[in-house]
Image: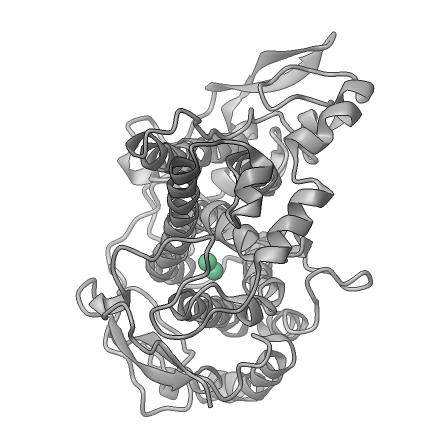
């Protein structure tokens, strides 16, 4: 079950060949996917041969195989983690029952919505990142971008497989629509806000892969608990790919900071204009980018109080992060959770039924995980003898979803007037000069072993390759 069949047109470990109707439907979707990739995938990359990893097995050891391939020839396919015949539902109203191999009729609409919303983010990020290859700071980074792009493409395949196999005609229609919406398109945008924002430069890209791919990790982890077993198994495998995306973000920002700290020490200055004259990204700008990407990303978890979120949990569709490791009754009835609201110009905590706060529970787990990586960035600064520390802003800062969207809050968590917000916005969020300055650094550096001035080389190559390894062959 776990070995992948590459002799078929669509690589898979789900015995696709035994279901001719499904196989044919997916084979009809496949050329549309390739057309989408050619149309809106990585710009100017058609003939590049890229050192990519491809899944050969879903076993924890050795699932990846490395080699130079053209991206449009990447073996996108359908891979599920092995099933456990005895797996039981371990939360919600159906706790203790056997997991479902098919979609129960009464949950069909909600499950479809969950799968479509997740699926929509995958092609969206490829679209958002399509121009970045033209300004890569190194061949190593270019390869990592492309690896992420093909894996997001595969994540789309994962969701499309579920739609085709389990949702009949509406599933096929939804799968088609996933190739029609476009990130940032006024008339037909992607479903979620953060996936319609531009990713204009590599600082944004690293922030996106650190913060927004981490949202992916938490959403996928919650779906990996699902009572709908095929969804649980496919999201489990997606999580192993997601880990690399977050690594690219965390190490990318870490290398930016390392280089900035080095120049700060050489010039013995933290003066922004001097550091910009020296061609590195000053820490206040890094902080503003953090403020932006963090706040936009925590909105993705949805409203702090949500009856839909309660339904998803009660009915077993979506669990909590690491649901199985938690020691409570996994039904949560009668329990409460604290959410924030603004009252008389102050943020105050309010106790609400925990089931209605499931979005907030997941958001808070996400916040803990994000903060840990920011602390690792701070260690880079401390080690270099720099006193400045980076931090994520308060969770009420710059929110557009939920109870906090109606109130202006400083990065420290103080409710401010509209006037104070306007006066400080350029200090708190990336301003026009920041964006223009970062854009001015985005030249293309792609000779093997060379790096743009604003970023340090990585500690180690991909698959332990040498520093001057030719990750991308330009044809
Ligand atoms: Fe993804
Ligand atoms: Fe990702």
**Left or right position of 231 against 296:** left
Image height of 113 relative to 412, above or below: below
Task: In the rendered view, tell whether residue 353 sits above or below residue 307.
Answer: above
Instruction: Answer left or right for 300 relative to 459.
Output: right
| Residue at x-position 57% and y-position 41% | 289
- At 65% from the left and 21% from the top, the residue drawn is 410
Q: Picture coordinates of residue 86 (x, y %)?
A: 24, 55
Judged from this view, the residue extending furthest toward the front is: 267
Q: Is residue 206 left or right of residue 50?
A: right
Residue at the location (51% across, 68% down)?
156
Which sits in the foreground, 183 or 421? 421
**Can see residue 109?**
no
Residue 240 visible to the viewer: yes
Name the quadrant of the N terminus.
bottom left
Whether 361 is drawn above or below 10: the answer is: above
Q: Position of residue 415 (x, y in %)?
A: 69, 15
- Picture coordinates of residue 154 (x, y %)? 45, 71
Q: How many marks?
A: 0
Q: Residue furthest top?
A: 344
Which residue is pictured at 45% across the width and 47% down the height?
Answer: 210
Most foreground residue, 124 or 219: 124
Q: Residue 81, position in %: x, y? A: 30, 64
Foreground pick, 327 / 150: 150
Task: Pick the residue in front: 96 or 379.
Answer: 379
């Amino acid at each position: 079950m776990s070995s992948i069949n590459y002799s078929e047109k669509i690589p898979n470990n789900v015995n696709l060949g035994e279901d001719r109707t499904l196989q044919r439907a997916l084979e009809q979707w496949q050329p549309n996917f390739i057309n989408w990739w050619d149309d809106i995938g990585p710009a100017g990359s058609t003939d590049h041969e890229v050192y990519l990893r491809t899944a050969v097995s879903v076993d924890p050891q050795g699932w990846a195989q490395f080699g130079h391939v053209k991206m449009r020839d990447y073996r996108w396919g359908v891979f599920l983690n092995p099933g456990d015949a005895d797996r039981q539902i371990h939360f919600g109203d159906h706790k203790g029952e056997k997991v479902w191999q098919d979609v129960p009729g009464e949950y069909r609409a909600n499950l479809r919505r969950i799968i479509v919303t997740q699926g929509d983010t995958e092609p969206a990020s490829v679209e958002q990142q399509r121009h970045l290859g033209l300004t890569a700071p190194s061949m190593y980074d270019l390869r990592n971008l492309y690896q992420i792009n093909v894996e997001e493409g595969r994540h789309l395949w994962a969701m499309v497989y579920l739609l085709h196999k389990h949702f009949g005609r509406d599933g096929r229609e939804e799968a088609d629509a996933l190739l029609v919406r476009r990130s940032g398109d006024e008339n037909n945008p992607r479903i979620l806000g953060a996936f319609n924002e531009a990713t204009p430069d590599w600082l944004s890209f690293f922030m996106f892969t650190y913060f927004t791919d981490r949202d992916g990790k938490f959403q996928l982890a919650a779906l990996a608990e699902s009572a709908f077993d095929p969804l649980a198994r496919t999201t489990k495998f997606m999580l192993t790919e997601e880990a690399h995306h977050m690594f690219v973000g965390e190490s990318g920002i870490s290398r930016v900071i390392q280089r900035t700290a080095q120049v700060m020490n050489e010039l013995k200055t933290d003066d922004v204009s001097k550091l910009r004259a020296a061609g590195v990204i000053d820490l206040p700008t890094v902080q503003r980018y953090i403020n932006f990407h963090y706040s936009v990303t925590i909105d993705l978890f949805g409203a702090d109080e949500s009856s839909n979120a309660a339904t998803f949990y009660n009915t077993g569709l979506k669990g909590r992060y690491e649901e199985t490791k938690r020691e409570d009754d996994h039904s949560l009835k009668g329990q409460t959770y604290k959410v924030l609201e603004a009252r008389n110009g102050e943020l105050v905590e309010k106790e609400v039924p925990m089931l209605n706060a499931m979005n907030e529970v997941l958001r808070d787990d996400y916040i803990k995980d994000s903060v840990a990586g920011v602390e690792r960035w701070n260690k880079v600064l401390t080690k270099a003898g720099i006193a400045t520390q980076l931090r994520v802003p308060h969770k009420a800062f710059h929110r557009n979803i939920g109870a906090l969207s109606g109130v202006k809050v400083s990065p420290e968590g103080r409710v401010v007037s509209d006037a104070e917000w306007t006066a400080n916005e350029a200090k708190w969020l990336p301003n026009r000069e920041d964006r223009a300055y970062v854009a001015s650094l985005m030249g293309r550096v792609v000779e093997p072993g060379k790096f743009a001035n604003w970023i340090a080389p990585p500690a180690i190559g991909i698959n332990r390759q040498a520093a001057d390894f030719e990750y991308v062959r330009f044809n």
